[in-house]
Image (cartoon, grey):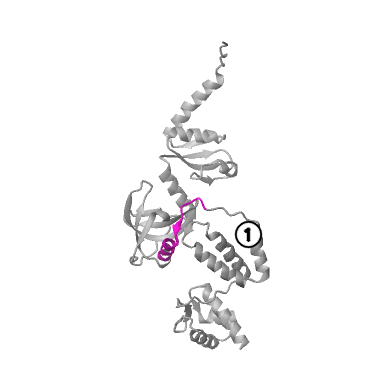
Amino acid sequence: MVDTSARLLRLLALLQTRRDWATADLAERLGVAARTIRRDMGRLRGLGYPVHSTPGVAGGYRLGAGAALPPLLLDDDEAVAVTVGLRTAADGSVSGIEEASVRALAKLEHLLPARLRHRVATARAMSVPSPSPGPKVDVSVLTALAAACRDHHQLRFDYRDHNAVTSLRTVEPHHLVYTRHRWYLVAFDRDREDWRSFRADRLTPRVPTGPRFTPRQPPAEDLVGFVTRGIADALWRYRARVVVRAPAASVADRLPPTWVLETTDADTCVLDAGADTPHMLAVYLAALDVDFDVLDAPELTERLGVLARRFTRAASSTPQETPQE
């Protein structure tokens, strides 16, 4: 009975790690025959766990959603990660989960062995919490967006843009991205026939979700970079690309957060830079104190010429003495 109970716990843990399991894979993991797996699945069903099966030679099993949450079997690192995460949830960017986080934390800490409680206590003592400066997003909105991304369901929502104009959008959701203290939904906008990023705190999903869709190729491998470039396009009125004659690491810390830095080689990098006007962009670039070349941006080149003449005249002029009273 002890061996059977231990095997059932291991089997339940495996079912929680991925969506579908082939019978042969489970049998290999547990070192038992396929018929033993079938008997154990029957035992799990008898205990109330919703185990779904697919018949046939290539059949398998899936742990479905039931009336109660099955026990989660965590290793040491997972238990510490979840505990630390729950401690910081109240100050995070997701609203509506503070009380639930406290309840879950109390249950988890009660079960932690002494060695793990010590690790959690050390992490807490050595950390200084800082509330997220970004806007909070209701947890129900994030879960609805995540589910639509996972299930490939079209999504409709009311969206308020940066000018406070609200519109109805119909999208094919792809992924959630958290960057610069905000949550963004990366999705294909069906009305505009293009990829867009939407701030999650500005949208209100409409239910039910739409029909399923076939996922498209994402707009970029680096979705964080895609979102960042979208933020920059919305923020700055004027943009230009500039080749900087210096290593990327030497200028990265001096750039505005919405400028995109691309490394070309050990000695140069390319900036996708922006500002409200060509004049302001020229001033920002001058403040970097490095050599650079402008790529196909005549307005910026003109303003740099104006500033160059002004600075040259100021550097060559003789200061006049201040009149004495």
Q: Who is closer to the viewer here, 231 or 205?
A: 205
Q: Which residues are magenta?
A: 132-148
Position of residue 44 measured from the top left corner of the image (x, y, whole percent): 51, 84
Q: Which residue is mark 1?
A: 124
Q: In the rendered picture of this protein, how many numbered marks are placed on residues?
A: 1
Q: Quadrant of the C terminus?
A: top right
Q: Quadrant of residue 147?
A: bottom left
Q: Who is closer to the viewer here, 110 or 18?
A: 110
Q: Quadrant of the N terminus?
A: bottom right
Position of residue 55 measured from the top left corner of the image (x, y, whole percent): 44, 84
Q: Is residue 289 above or below residue 253?
A: above
Asked whether the viewer can see residue 222, the reply is no
Determine whether the residue tagged by mark 1 lies in a helix, strand or loop.
helix
Residue at 57% x, 41% y: name it: 251
Position of residue 270 measured from the top left corner of the image (x, y, whole percent): 51, 42
Q: Residue furthest top?
A: 325
Q: Who is closer to the viewer here, 115 or 56?
A: 115
Disc 1: CA contacts within 10 A as few (<14), some (14-19) or many (>=20): some
Q: Is residue 61 above or below residue 287?
A: below
